[in-house]
Image: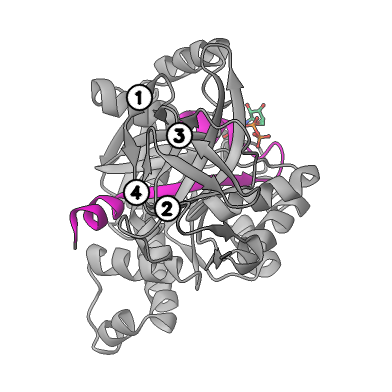
């Protein structure tokens, strides 16, 4: 692998999709909090601190107003792209789906699969976006993880991979058993610890792990071979097979938690980096190819003025370079390039294929338009996704 490919393998460009009120915003905020805290000051997983931090962020108005926020988890760069969740914004959802390589689908554990979740799920199907499911709000009265899993199978037509079991329910919801590693994640007063599977759940967990292995073996040759030989797949073998099935959109891992109570978010992040694809898994990307990039959101900021969020599909975007807006046929000059984090912007001189950055200085480019090398004009055409490059000249 080249250095670029190596770096790209650790990138996840993801969005969160959900029915309104299922907890998309809360989940996004928690992801930014836990990644930010771990990144900056190490392992401080205190619930009260999380809420405090998020209130400050909200007051400053920067957490979720960004079209794309870069954060870090377990050696990976996660670009969290803000996906509108409402049915009215279907076109905007579709535009965002072109920019994502994977998504987290959040469900309300009481309501299960709601109509809007179905709509957005079908759109994601159309764009071939691999997903992991997060059954949220398990602390609520009436929440039922297994009923939600059944609805995911029946209404969404995917093969759910039950990779977790909840520990406790409703007000007594304490954490989750990871069926792949057979370890339990529990949160006490906001503190996250990984412990042995509680003895009362051990039998259930073994049974559900067998079911998981059988479901994976059904579609994955390697696990099938182990299964037929009576070999129990290791956690690593099972993770790898789940990743293969997820990336191929042949199955969908289902996890659970309560974002509001800060339970389940760290294992969800583990699943994002373990199971969802990198830009390399989705399409051939190369820094050496001519530039092709999609402007997917234009925003303005009190301090910076107008800036444009761009997903680079091939080539490099370099500050000061002249590029062509392939749709309008007009030239544009690239100003400063930023990576946007929850609490700061970092100026970078250039960005490569697979990346998502904010660009200053574009005067004529609007949402949905293509930026390309003037010598190689292209238009990124949504109809042709996921092989989106159309040569113009
Ligand atoms: P969105 O519309 O999908 O972005 O949903 P929000 O994140 O704004 O959440 C909708 C409501 O559900 C808010 O009042 C949240 O506080 C609440 N909520 C979110 N997650 C949970 C959860 O895990 N448990 C409970 N009980 N409430 C939650």
The part of the chain drawn in magenta is: 2-30
Kindly indicate the quadrant of the structure image that contains residue 209.
bottom left
The reply to whether residue 107 is visible in this rendering is: no
Q: Residue 125 placed where, x, y %? A: 62, 65
Q: Nearer the viewer, residue 298 or 362?
A: 362
The tag on residue 11 is 4
SS label for mark 3: loop
SS label for mark 2: loop
Q: Residue 134 placed where, x, y %? A: 53, 49
SS label for mark 1: strand
* Quarter of the image that includes the N terminus: bottom left
3 or 4: mark nearer the eye: 3
Q: Is residue 337 left or right of residue 144?
A: left
The residue tagged 3 is: 334
Distance from Cα at disc 1 to Cα at disc 4 = 17 Å
Pointer 2 or 3: first along the chain:
2
Which residue is found at the position 43% from the left and 81% from the top?
219
Pointer 2 or 4: first along the chain:
4
Q: Is residue 92 above or below residue 130?
A: above
The reply to whether residue 77 is visible in this rendering is: yes
Pointer 2 or 1: first along the chain:
2
User: Circle 3: is it few (<14), some (14-19), or many (20+) Cα within 10 Å?
Assistant: some
User: Circle 2: is it few (<14), some (14-19), or many (20+) Cα within 10 Å?
Assistant: many
* Quarter of the image that includes the C terminus: bottom right
Pointer 1 or 4: first along the chain:
4
Which residue is found at the position 61% from the left and 27% from the top?
299
Q: Residue 225 placed where, x, y %? A: 28, 87
Distance from Cα at disc 1 to Cα at disc 3 = 16 Å
The tag on residue 291 is 2
Q: Nearer the viewer, residue 291 or 213?
A: 291
Q: Nearer the viewer, residue 223 or 183?
A: 223
Q: Are marks 3 and 4 in contact (CB under 8 Å)?
A: no
């Amino acid at each position: 692998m080249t250095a670029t490919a190596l770096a790209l393998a650790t990138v996840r460009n993801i969005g969160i999709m959900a029915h309104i009120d299922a907890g998309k915003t809360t989940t996004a905020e928690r992801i930014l909090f836990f990644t930010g805290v771990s990144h900056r000051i190490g392992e401080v997983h205190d619930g009260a601190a999380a809420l405090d931090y998020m209130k400050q962020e909200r007051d400053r108005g920067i957490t979720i107003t960004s079209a794309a926020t870069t954060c870090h988890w377990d050696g990976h760069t996660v670009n969290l792209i803000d996906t509108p969740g409402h049915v009215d914004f279907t076109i905007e959802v579709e535009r965002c789906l072109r920019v994502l390589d994977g998504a987290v689908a959040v469900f309300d554990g009481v309501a299960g699969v709601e109509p809007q979740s179905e709509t957005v799920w079908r759109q994601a199907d159309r764009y071939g976006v691999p997903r992991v499911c997060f059954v949220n709000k398990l602390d609520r009265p009436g929440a039922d993880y297994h009923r939600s899993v059944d609805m995911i199978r029946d209404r969404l037509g995917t093969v759910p991979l039950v990779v977790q079991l909840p520990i406790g329910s409703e007000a007594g919801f304490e954490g989750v058993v990871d069926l792949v590693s057979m370890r339990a994640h529990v949160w006490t007063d906001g503190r996250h610890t990984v412990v042995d599977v509680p003895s009362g759940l051990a039998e259930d967990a073994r049974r559900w792990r067998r079911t998981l292995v059988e479901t994976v073996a059904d579609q994955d040759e390697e696990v099938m071979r182990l299964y037929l030989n009576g070999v129990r797949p290791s956690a690593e073998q099972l993770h790898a097979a789940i990743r293969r099935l997820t990336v191929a959109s042949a199955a969908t891992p289902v996890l659970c938690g309560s974002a509001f109570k800060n339970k389940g978010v760290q294992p969800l992040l583990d699943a994002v980096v373990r199971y969802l694809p990198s830009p390399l898994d989705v399409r051939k990307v190369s820094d050496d190819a001519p530039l092709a990039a999609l402007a997917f959101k234009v925003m303005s900021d009190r301090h910076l003025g107008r800036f444009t969020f761009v997903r680079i599909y091939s080539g490099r975007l370099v500050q000061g370079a002249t590029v062509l807006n392939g749709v309008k046929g007009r030239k544009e000059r690239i100003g400063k390039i930023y990576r946007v984090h929850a609490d700061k912007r970092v100026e970078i001189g250039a960005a490569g294929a697979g990346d998502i950055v904010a660009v200053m200085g574009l005067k004529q480019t609007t949402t949905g338009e293509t930026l390309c090398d003037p010598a190689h004009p292209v238009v990124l055409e949504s109809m042709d996704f996921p092989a989106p490059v159309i040569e113009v000249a």
